[in-house]
Amino acid sequence: MSEPIPVVRTTDHGTAKLMPDVDRARAWLLTVDGAPQSYVDLDEPTHLEFEYARRLGHVLDAVAKPGRPLAVVHLGGGALTLPRYVAATRPGSRQDVVEADRGLLTLVTEHLPVPAGAGIALHPADARTWLEAAPDGTADVLVADVFGGSRVPAHLTSLGYAREAERVLRTGGCYLANLADAAPFGFLRSQLATFAAVFEELALIAEPGVLRGRRFGNAVLVASHRPLDTAAVARRTAADAFPARVEHGAALREFIGAARPVADADAVPSPEPPEGAFGIG
């Protein structure tokens, strides 16, 4: 049997590369313009290699009783890591994946096909445009993991966008976003302030070193109208190889400080990561 070989393709928004993992038989790393985007193990879809993906997975596990099917919208497709995870952990779920790069979707479905009957619908479209056309109250969870290169696009950071996300969620639904920033956290604080203006409950999951301003890194924002089981999520994130902290309540309000919600006219992309911030390895 021949060894899997890397696949490189120019897609709509960059150069995508699928690289096989030498340690896992059918596992692949997806990069776009050299930046790691997704990791998928086709034989073990519940394996979440990236730390931020595990944190999103911990929240997805906590939002409803184990195994209960959910209606999930994923803004940003990558290699479909989290849709595969939800399909495996919550069979019968209905999932919509919105990915602006049609060529990337084609590459992923050709080389890393989703099992038939997984309940995953793919939509080649801009995330906000698709969201604005989606019907009210149709999703239990909305996961935003959208990066243009290494930055969250500006139109997915504003109060108008947050209101669209809230509209599409069902009562008690949950919004999750993968964000990235570093001290003094101007972008992250503004995102928390923006979603605090729309949702009653917020939480933030990140490594202590990132929260203390020691380095640039990912942070998972969680927003809902009902309290998240932060204790359960905290136990899981604390047990990871790179433990994370769950901030909420008074500590999170203090972190937000004087930051204000972001209007569409004032929205900017997330900051450019420093060189080497998200290396492969």
Image (cartoon, rainbow, N blue to C red):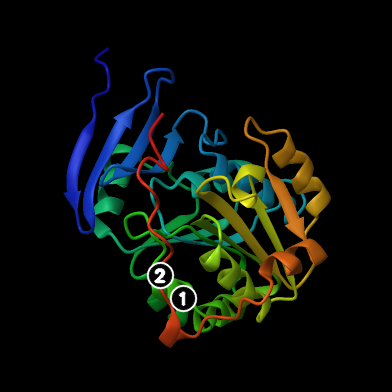
Query: Pointer 1: residues within 10 angstroms few (<14), some, or many (20+)?
Result: some
Decide if residue 53 is on the left or right side of residue 121. Answer: right
Check whether the beta carbons of the residues at disc 1 and disc 2 lie within 8 A of each other: yes
Residue 155 lies, in percent from the top left, at 41, 76
Which type of secondary structure does the marked residue at label 2 adopt?
Answer: helix
Kindly identify which residue carries mark 1.
131
Tell me the kind of residue under disc 1.
Answer: Leu
Residue 140 lies, in percent from the top left, at 64, 65
Toward the viewer: 18 or 251?
Answer: 251
Toward the viewer: 243 or 16?
Answer: 243
Residue 189 lies, in percent from the top left, at 60, 68
- Residue 127: assigned label: 2
Could you tell me if residue 62 is visible in this image?
Answer: yes
Tell me the kind of residue under disc 2.
Answer: Ala
Which type of secondary structure does the marked residue at label 1 adopt?
Answer: helix
Q: Residue at x 38, y 33 (%)?
A: 280
